[in-house]
Amino acid sequence: MSDTAAAAASDAEGSASRTPKGAGKDEKKRGLGARIGLFVRQVIAELKKVVRPTRSELGTYTSVVLVFVAVVMAFVTVVDLGIGQLTLWAFGG
């Protein structure tokens, strides 16, 4: 293993065992209301980072999904009909 890879592995192991800043003893002192308030603030901060698609992007995404679903439906239909015909041939129906 190279020195860089070894250093990265040791950093990853060390960071997994460390607690983030502000965690630890202070977390035990917070009451239920403070923890809920912190959670709500963090949720709002994350929602502010969300990028919503434009109307044209949404139309493109929707059409891609519908085409994909139609192709998968057609494939499953063909496979189902093929297995049905194979079963009829094998068991003489």
Image (tube, helix red, strand yellow):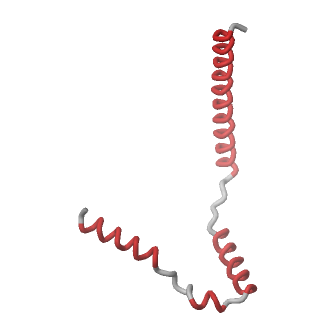
Q: Residue at x 40, y 70 (%)?
A: 12
Quarter of the picture containing the N terminus is bottom left
Q: Where is residue 70 shown, x and y percent of the image?
A: 68, 31
The answer to whether 8 is drawn above or below residue 73 in the figure is below
Q: Residue at x 67, y 35 (%)?
A: 69
Q: In this rendered view, identify the residue nearer to me: 44 or 21.
A: 21
Q: Where is residue 90 shown, x and y percent of the image?
A: 64, 11
Q: Where is residue 34 shown, x and y percent of the image?
A: 71, 87
Residue 52 in which image quadrant: bottom right
Residue 43 in which image quadrant: bottom right
Asked whether, in this view, residue 24 is left or right of residue 82, the answer is left
Q: In this rendered view, identify the residue nearer to me: 83 or 3.
A: 83
Q: In this rendered view, identify the residue nearer to me: 7 or 43.
A: 7
The answer to whether 7 is drawn above or below residue 74 in the figure is below
The answer to whether 59 is drawn above or below residue 81 in the figure is below
Residue 89 in which image quadrant: top right
The answer to whether 58 is drawn above or below residue 25 in the figure is above
Quarter of the picture containing the C terminus is top right
Q: Where is residue 32 shown, x and y percent of the image?
A: 74, 85
Asked whether, in this view, residue 37 is left or right of residue 14, the answer is right
Asked whether, in this view, residue 10 is left or right of residue 87, the answer is left
Work out which residue is located at the far top of the displayed protein and give it.
92
